[in-house]
Amino acid sequence: MSAKVDTSLPLEYQTEQDRMNIFGFWIFLGAEIVLFATLFMVYGVLGGRTAGGPGPEDIFQIKDVMIETLLLLTSSFTCGLAIFEMRRQNLKGLLTWLIITVLLGVGFVYMEITEFIHYVSLGATMQTSAFLSSFFVLLGTHGLHVTVGIGWVTIIIIQLLRRGLTPVTARKTFIISLYWHFLDVVWIFIFTFVYLKGMV
């Protein structure tokens, strides 16, 4: 029995199965919010416990953090443009913006790894203090999520190249866009409550 299609809806919402999958992903994002909220609370409790080691004002570099922020927020914009092109049934435009999103994401991860290496060279490791432990776990968890997102978008790009724009590939593209925007929102909180607060 074929799924009932409602062509009045966007491509990714046209079947009941697609709508249920998207709804299920919203529930998954709810669990992700709980995860990051927990990590933020741990950082809030431990953020001032430096144990005589370097504190945020000693290691944070606003220039590098701004570059990371620019890369990730721009990737959120390009991801939005990808969905815009998808709604226009423009496969070429969709692929172009998804590829740019991946490249920006790779740039962000590279900058974050470079940042971590710099901190370690200053003697700021996970073992140094509770502050650094909570910092590396929070930032590392977010960075891991971005890395997963990069791989996920790459797989979607391959599927779009092989299968074209269908309700299934549109739904998968829309879901990864939700995930990507979620990571950008988490980064805004990290930028505000970890970096900006730490440099004041």
Image (cartoon, grey):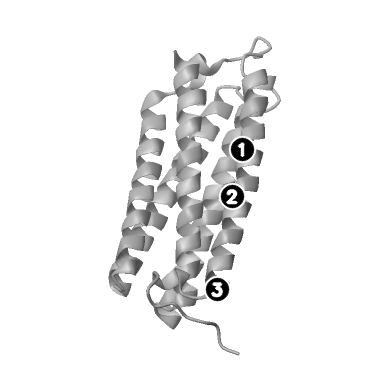
Q: CA distance from mark 1 to mark 3?
A: 31 Å
Q: How many marks?
A: 3
Secondary structure, mark 2, is: helix
Secondary structure, mark 1, is: helix
Nearer to the camera, 2 or 108:
2
User: Which mark's residue is nearer the viewer, 1 or 3?
Assistant: 3
Query: Which residue is labeled 3 in the image?
Result: 16
Query: Which residue is labeled 1 in the image?
Result: 36
Q: In the displayed structure, would residue 67 be above or below residue 83? A: above
Badge 1 amino acid = Phe
Asked if the residue at tag 3 contacts the one at tag 1, i.e. Cβ–Cβ closer than 8 Å, the answer is no
Q: Residue at x 65, y 47 (%)?
A: 31
- When asked about the image quadrant of residue 128, the answer is top right
Badge 3 amino acid = Glu
**Where in the figure is residue 19, as x and y percent of width and height?**
53, 67
User: Which mark's residue is nearer the viewer, 3 or 2?
Assistant: 3
Residue reaching furthest bottom? 1
Mark closest to the chain's N terminus, 1 or 3: 3
Query: Which residue is labeled 2 in the image?
Result: 29
Q: Residue at x 56, y 88 (%)?
A: 2
Nearer to the camera, 171 or 73:
171
Q: Residues within 10 Å of mark 1 (few under 14, many from 20)?
A: some
**Where in the figure is residue 159, as x and y percent of width and height?**
47, 75
Mark closest to the chain's N terminus, 3 or 2: 3
Secondary structure, mark 3, is: helix
